[in-house]
Amino acid sequence: MDIKRVKVGVVGCGIISHVYLRNMTRLFRILDVVAVCDLNAELAQQAAKEYGVPHIMTLDEMAQSPEIELVVNLTGADAHYAIIKKMLLAGKHVYTEKTMTSRLEQAKELVQIANDKHLYLGVAPDTVLGASIQTARWAIDHGLIGDVTSCIVSINRDQNLNAERFRFLRNEGGALPYDVGIYYIQSLLTLLGPVSEVTGFGAPAPQRRRQFLFNENDPDTWQIPGNNLVAGSLRFQQGALGMLHFDGNTIGAECSTFRIYGTAGILELGDPNRFGDPVRLLKPESEPCYLPLTHGYNGTCVLDDATDFEKGYGNRGIGVAELAWAIRGGRPNRLSKEMGFHALEVLCGLDKAAETGDVYRMTSTFTCAPLTPGIYSTMWMGGARADAELSLVD
């Protein structure tokens, strides 16, 4: 297929950048990463050297570069608004790590700028384009569980301990619902479509006392902003009811629950922070079974020398590649600004409902087409690499 590759600049060379850069430089042929940027010049230099990226730029240089079409923002959530706005105003398409921002009014402004300038704005998480969620979407769309009636998702983490190790979690967007709960919300949106109403309760993180002796420059106490524990309910536009439980104020032994109920069956999913966890189907009068995956990008790293982090998480960057194919095809991208805004509005709606005790009525909507099934990442029982990128073209 003869097509002009999309030239990409990456902002943020922290932990998550490694799997992105590895995939964007070696896995997706539509992408051509030409520049990296980080406030820490040493990190940018290391990333450029390790992944063969030819240029190290400042933010201003990236915004002014006539070569770069698409900017991938991998910074912390509190920095998203300023960086995305700068790049949109400079005429660049943007793909950002979750969430778009942590404030709804800022997100609304970014969507408006993108619309006015006819630019793409894509929003993670892209795990919803992985084999697990796409297989579940296929099962629902093909009636395997009948009409969906309800759903329940739950995740726990010791987010306070995590925030002592990863300092960016102490800023806006670092509370568990925004940092991790968004994977569950975005997955539900991919499977069941837009939400009409939100309600729930929330609780803040406790004051954290410093425990790591090697963090000598840390304050003695600090607190993650926002609600770190949320128990909420959703009503989807198609009629299903949902329950959410995101607890960042407990221990770190994660217990993930993800279940979709229907009139003719039940689907049980694994961790939506991964790409290829099993999808289990429960039907009356028969033993539960695991569905064969209908799509590629199952989290298996098909590149050489997979790192431990890439095992199960190894397809990050698929959302960037899908957006790039959308640019070249002149079609909407799946992880659209509308979907990213709607997911953020669910989170903000939960906070608003917790604050007021009222039901929050959603103002936004979106559409998200499924990927083409039957195109896989591997072949011959995993013995060779296949070309799942073809599923991203249309």
Image: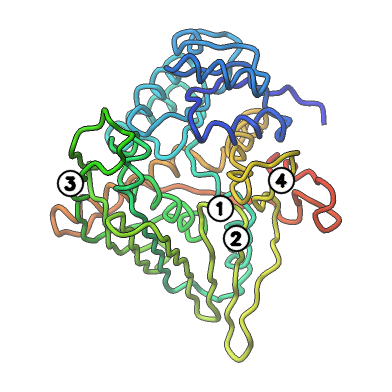
Q: Mark 2 points at which residue?
A: 277
Instruction: Tell me whether circle 4 and circle 3 mark residues in contact (CB < 8 Å).
Output: no
Q: Which of marks 2 and 4 is nearer the N terminus?
A: 2
Amino acid at pointer 3: Gln
Q: Which of marks 1 and 3 is nearer the N terminus?
A: 3
Residue 39 visible to the viewer: yes
Q: What element carries label 2?
A: loop
Residue 295 sits in quarter: bottom right
- 78 vs 122, left or right, is left
Please state, as top left, top right, bottom left or bottom right, where the C terminus lies in the image: top right
Label 1 Cα neighbours within 10 Å, binned few <14 / some 14-19 / many ≥20: many
Question: What is the CA distance from the residue labelled 1 to the residue labelled 3?
Answer: 31 Å
- Give residue 346's mark: none
- Look at discs 1 and 3 and give the one toward the viewer: 3
Q: Earlier in the sequence, mark 1 or mark 4?
A: 1
Q: Mark 4 points at which residue?
A: 391
- Look at discs 2 and 4 and give the one toward the viewer: 2
Label 2 Cα neighbours within 10 Å, binned few <14 / some 14-19 / many ≥20: some
- Look at discs 3 and 2 and give the one toward the viewer: 3
Percent of width and height locating residue 276: 62, 56
The residue closer to the viewer here, 215 or 148, is 215
